[in-house]
Image (cartoon, helix red, strand yellow):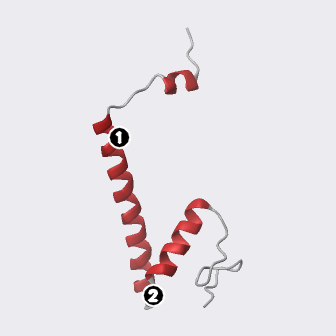
């Protein structure tokens, strides 16, 4: 008997403590990503503008073009 992937996925369950662990690990993974991005900015001798760094990271994460002041525009340059 073959089980479809969606049927198998829907049959999985996770207790509340498991979801807390998943969310905590995901958040730590996100912090590590931002930390590596900040370290790479420092490695080239540039200052780390936290707000612009988070805008650039989150913009790439969700793949939505950001247009707010201090966010990268179409060519990737930061605007002030």
- The image position of residue 34, as x and y in percent, is 42, 69
Q: Residue at x 39, y 52 (%)?
A: 26
Q: Residue at x 43, y 90 (%)?
A: 47
Q: CA distance from mark 1 to mark 2?
A: 38 Å
The kind of secondary structure element at disc 2 is: loop
> Which is closer to the viewer, label 1 or label 2?
1
Callout 1 environment at 10 Å: few (<14), some (14 to 19), or many (20+)? few
In the depicted structure, whether residue 21 falls above or below residue 15: below
The residue under the point 67% across, 76% down is 67
Is 35 on the left or on the right of 3, as rendered?
left
Question: Residue 44: which disc?
Answer: 2
Q: How many neighbours does mark 2 have within 10 angstroms: few (below 14), some (14-19), or many (20 or more)?
A: few
**Horizontal relation, residue 15 to residue 61: left or right:** left
Instruction: Give the side of residue 25 with respect to residue 40, left or right.
Output: left
- What label does residue 19 carry, if any? 1
Vertical comparison of 74 with 78: above or below: above
């Amino acid at each position: 008997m073959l089980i479809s992937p969606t049927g198998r996925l829907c049959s999985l369950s996770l207790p509340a403590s498991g979801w807390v662990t998943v969310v905590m690990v995901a958040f730590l993974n996100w912090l590590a990503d931002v930390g590596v991005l900040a370290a790479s900015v420092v490695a080239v001798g540039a200052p780390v503008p936290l707000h612009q760094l988070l805008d650039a990271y989150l913009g790439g994460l969700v793949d939505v073009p950001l247009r707010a002041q201090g966010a990268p525009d179409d060519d990737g340059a930061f605007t002030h």
